[in-house]
Amino acid sequence: MRVNERVTMRWALTALAGATLVACGGGSDPSNDLPQGIKEISATVYPATTVGTGATAATQDLLTGGIGKTGLGAAAAPAYADPANPTAAELRRNALFSNYRGILDYTAKGGYGTLYGPNITAEGQVTASEGLIPGREYLAVQDDGSGRKQTVIAVQVPDSFNTSNPCIVLGPSSGSRGVYGAIGTAGEWGLKKGCAVALTDAGKGVGLHNLADDTVNKVDGTRATRTAAGALSFFAANLTDAVRSAYNAAFPNRIAIKHAHSQQNPEKDWGADTLAAGRYALYVLNARYGTADNPVPFTKGNTLVIAGSASNGGAASLRAAEQDGEGLIDGVVASEPVTEIPTAAGYGIQFDGAAVAGYGKTLAEYTTWGNIYQPCAALAADAAINETSIYNYITLTAMTARATARCDGLAAKGLVSGATTQERAADALAKLRAYGWNAENNTMHNAHYALGNGPILSAMYTMAYGRFGADANLCGSSFAAANATGDVIAAAPTALAQSAATANGTANGTPATVIYNDSVGGAKSWPFAVSPSTGVADFGLDNALCQYALVSGKDPVTGAALTAASTPTKAQSDAVRSGVAEVLHNANLRGKPAIIVAGRSDALVPVNNNARAYAALNRAVEGASSKLRYVEVMNGQHFDAFLPFSGFDTRFVPLHPYFNQAMDVMWAHLKNGGPLPANQVVRTTPRGGTAGAAPAITAANVPPFAMSPAPADQIGFVGTSISVPR
């Protein structure tokens, strides 16, 4: 009997005993009941020591998958015994590897191993340890009864969990990542503290349904046909075999992606899913440590619960606090959160004493707007940098001609002004600035567009919001693998087999990318798309305009309202806008203490549309009683994982140290009544040097935020406006 099987049997017996309800005289004693909608999958011991012998010997732990600090920082992921048929254990190990590195700078020069990492203790001491953390992991699936939601929860209970000092850290995943998406943020911090960590994919995750051969990811990451996977299928498109076959014939080799095609609008449930993970964590702890005399030793009243994560996970943490009518969450830490602001009325934003004009837009609005203008704006003089790096990608490769064509197409449609490319690019950049981006974002537009953020998110989120199926081809978009010239090809079987570990839940090319079906001459991936209205390769301008129309309800060229005969149709736009309405925050944190950390240079999630706007709206909603604190980090941008790239290394600092500090401060506040920091700007110092060879970071580059910052660094409020110093 394998370790996993043996532990699962013990877990089932323990859970049964813990769930017994004792009735007496018409009353009842407390019972430990499995939360509604939760289906348990497994419980596994990860001893952080080698289990087995010979070829089957393996080491696993909760944090690093058994590879430790050295393995997480290695040049490549651990190899599979059979790359075409990886085991669930191998996929888990490599998913931890890729998800940890997907949100952190894993290089020694960037601070890994010195400022943060598995080898650093909860008290901040740098050690020679590999940082393996033994414990148990309980895997479960939350569903709404349809069999299609399939939200995965992993509750990690370290052996260091202290039953006399119980704590839980809630870690919803960042981006579209799977259940381990917050392992490097909430996971590492919580496990080091001896807390149980409740990770959840919040309805996203790596669910790739290859429509050509009808194979899917299972909950454990392995792949099988949809029929063979059965109830353990993580995601399958809602298509009959007949419909799937017909679609394959017309659009071969397409791949359905869970976040985009689940028809669940998963973002609407991010907060509820985070709360569900917390309830399941309490159940797990009670099942593990409860006794017949005391079956429910842990409750929301005696267990400290902190929700903390980054990006979409930060948004989910805030949304959970807003929805937490039961008082489960004690505090929140959100790094660079994607806050869906419901209005720009009733509050304002000032920067350096001047009112900011563009703020408070939703993700759907600014993403689709940026997808129209970013490639042209990247050619502007104010967006240029004078070095060769991936950071300056559009202006240093063949993409320059396509970006110029985008400027020309915008001008022909009256969407930018100017007679020259430079004039048009400057106007495009101004339109981005007016929509919420700031001056610190100017030189980021190159990299963000060239890496596909605009095309990927504009396609995925409009599909998700409108609950469109995999065969809808919304605005002519679909997903598939593509070759070096942009032609659709069949996804490699090995890439699909390893996808649970290598993909991040988006159409980023691993293995599926965004395909523009309507490209002139035949379907092409977005970098090579030729718009029907222009006849040139311009990154599919028509596709981008269609996606913005879905969000705005108007033709962006004529300004006319969409109709039943327009492209897109009014009905499609109504569906998308209805979905957007479902995901809006209310900024009422119910008096809970919270810390938001954001980078001023974040061009993916601009602070004027997110962190600044949320802090201002929260103040308008909760007034002086608000316990939200806002920390804005200069030279911080959205992707710490990009910091090893040439050009990023010299110009930006990691946000992760500030997430960790915020978690430490929140812990001290909740445990010991320590102070919360004042709202402030943190003035960091980039590493500088030569692009691609920046000197090693030191603590001096990333000074801690202060409890009482200097007056020039304080963020305050002027009337109903948040006031941020330069």
Image (tube, helix red, strand yellow):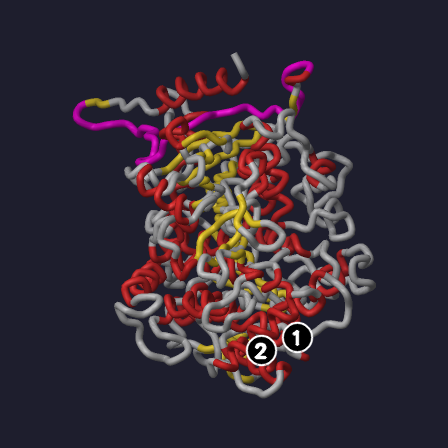
Q: Which mark is residue 383?
A: 1
- Tags 1 and 2 touching, CB below 8 Å: yes
Q: Residue 445: in sight, yes or no?
A: yes
Disc 1 to disc 2, how far (Cα)? Answer: 8 Å
Q: Nearer the viewer, residue 11 or 368?
A: 368
What stretch of residues is rendered in magenta? 25-54
Q: Residue furthest bottom?
A: 419
The secondary structure type at the circle numbered 2 is helix
The secondary structure type at the circle numbered 1 is helix
Residue at label 2?
A: 429
Q: Nearer the viewer, residue 427 or 122?
A: 427
Amino acid carrying label 2: it is Leu
Give above or below for 303 relative to 684: above
State the image coordinates of residue 456 (x, y, percent, origin top left): 51, 57
Instruction: Name the side, left or right, on which 336 lies relative to 386.
Output: left
Give above or below for 262 relative to 519: above
